[in-house]
Structure formats: structure tokens, C-alpha cells
Amino acid sequence: MSVNVQQYREINGICKQRNVTLVAVSKTKPAAEILELYQLGHRDFGENYVQELVDKQQQLPADIQWHFIGHLQSNKVKYIAPFVHMIHGVDSFKLLKEINKQALKNNRVIHVLLQVHIAQEETKFGLDEKELEELLSSPELSLLQNVCIRGLMGMASFSDDTELVRSEFKMLRTIYETRQPQTTFNLRFEILSMGMSADYRIALEEGSNMVRLGSLLFGARR
Ligand SMILES: *Cc1c(COP(=O)(O)O)cnc(C)c1O
């Protein structure tokens, strides 16, 4: 297995042209393969596991922008807070507060996306619309000086039913557009992160401006 460079160039071209951020999801893949994309100019990489991310960050160039895209437990935020660029899966105020606390300790601002539950499956994490509303209108939000909420992230159902997937992305886009909060120092909704290897084309058609691609670029994971 190795990086599919041609595929990368093609997809990266599409993303650049549309102003879409391509996050290369490198979970389970060796540092050498990340370096291969790095040498082609790529800087945004996504990881799902805290320990793996910490290990790779230590081995790889410091100007990589690391995206944590997995489910993050509050007690592990401290390990990635010194360097993580963006945390995609924030789905509770408790987690947001912990990210703020650890960012403050490191004297930095961590960018986050709120994860919205759009899939039919029970297993996917995320806020429902009401919880999102509550979080965004919480008076405590203005106390969090070391996080910046940059937008929403969602995962569609793992399904061959493209119309189902499309309808879930449509729903997330509608939420993103209709729930646009007023911009403040820690609230700047500009990112709609949706689309993985199997469904990124549909996600782009439905208005995604950040896709997270693993297997298309690095080959299948074991
Ligand atoms: C693993 C993962 C991806 C990438 O998945 P592929 O199907 O390999 O593109 C994207 N987003 C999240 C949240 C993931 O966990």
C-alpha cells in the first residue's frame, strides 16, 4: 500500500478550484506516507486516535495542521491541546469547556467544529438540532476565550443509497445556513465539513467546503 499520488493531485485540484479544504485522513497510516503528501505541498491531515496523533506530531514537520476528527474524550484533550489545529467532533458543552481550558493553559486558541447528528444510524455521535441551538445560545459561551467555533461537521449514513446520503447532507447544509449565529470573537461560522471517500462528490454538490478523505488517498485501511 502507498499513497495514490495521481488520485491526490486530481482531487486536490478539484478542491483548490472550489475553495474546499482537503483534509487527508491518515489514521492507521505510517508517518512516511504522510510525508509523501507533505512533500507534494499538503499540510492538512486528519487523525482519529489521540495517542497515534501525538506520536505522529512528534515525528513529522511542525507546520502540519493536524485535525482531530475522531470522538474525543474530555480527559484526553490535554494531550493534543499544545498543537492541534482543529477539533471536528465537538458534541457537548462539557467537551468545549475542557478544550477551552487546555487551550488557555497552552496560551492558544483552538478551532473547533460542532458535530451534528444527521445519519439514520444510532451509532454516530453528534448534536441534534435542539442541542445545537442550546449550545450556541448558551450564555456561558462568551466566557470561552480560547476556542473559536468555526462551523459544523457531519457524517452521512454509511449506505449505498445516494439519495439518502444526499438528503442528509442537504439537511446539514440547511442547518448550517439557517442557524448561522452572529459572528463574535469565538464564533465564526465559515466551515461546513462533510464528505468522506465514499460520498465526497455528493457532499461537494451539496455545499461542503471541507472534505475528509482517507482511503481514496492512502488506500484501504485494515
Ligand atoms: C476515517 C474517517 C474519515 C475518512 O474515511 P475514508 O472513508 O477513508 O475517506 C473521515 N471522517 C471521519 C470522521 C473519519 O473517522
Image (tube, rainbow, N blue to C red):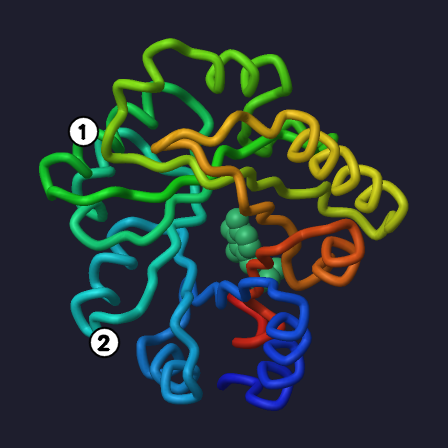
The one of 140 and 122 positioned closer to us in this rendering: 140
On the picture, is 37 further left or further right than 85?
Answer: right
Q: Secondary structure at mark 2?
A: loop
State ligand 1's quadrant. Answer: bottom right
Residue 15 image point, x, y percent: 63, 70
Residue 100 image point, x, y percent: 24, 31
The one of 74 and 85 positioned closer to us in this rendering: 85
Residue 77 image point, x, y percent: 24, 38
Residue type at mark 1: give it.
Lys
Q: Secondary structure at mark 1?
A: helix
Residue type at mark 2: give it.
Pro
- Residue 96 vertical placement versus 41 (above, below): above
Number of residues whose C-alpha sits closer than 10 Å to that of mark 2, classed few (under 14), some (14–19) or many (20 or more): few
- Residue 209 vertical placement versus 112 (above, below): below
**Which quadrant holds residue 186?**
top left
**Which quadrant holds residue 74?**
top left
What residue is at 42 percent from the left and 38 percent from the top?
71
What residue is at 32 percent from the left and 32 percent from the top?
73
On the picture, is 178 further left or further right than 182?
Answer: right
The one of 88 and 148 positioned closer to us in this rendering: 148
On the picture, is 67 further left or further right than 61?
Answer: right
- Which sits earlier in the primary sequence, circle 2 or circle 1? 2
Per the image, the residue denoted by label 2 is: 61
Residues marked 2 and 1 touching at CB (< 8 Å): no
Q: What separation in Å lies between label 2 and label 1 (alpha carbons)? A: 26 Å
**Which quadrant holds residue 99?**
top left
The one of 14 and 59 positioned closer to us in this rendering: 14
On the picture, is 11 further left or further right than 78?
Answer: right
Per the image, the residue denoted by label 1 is: 101
What residue is at 68 percent from the left and 75 percent from the top?
14
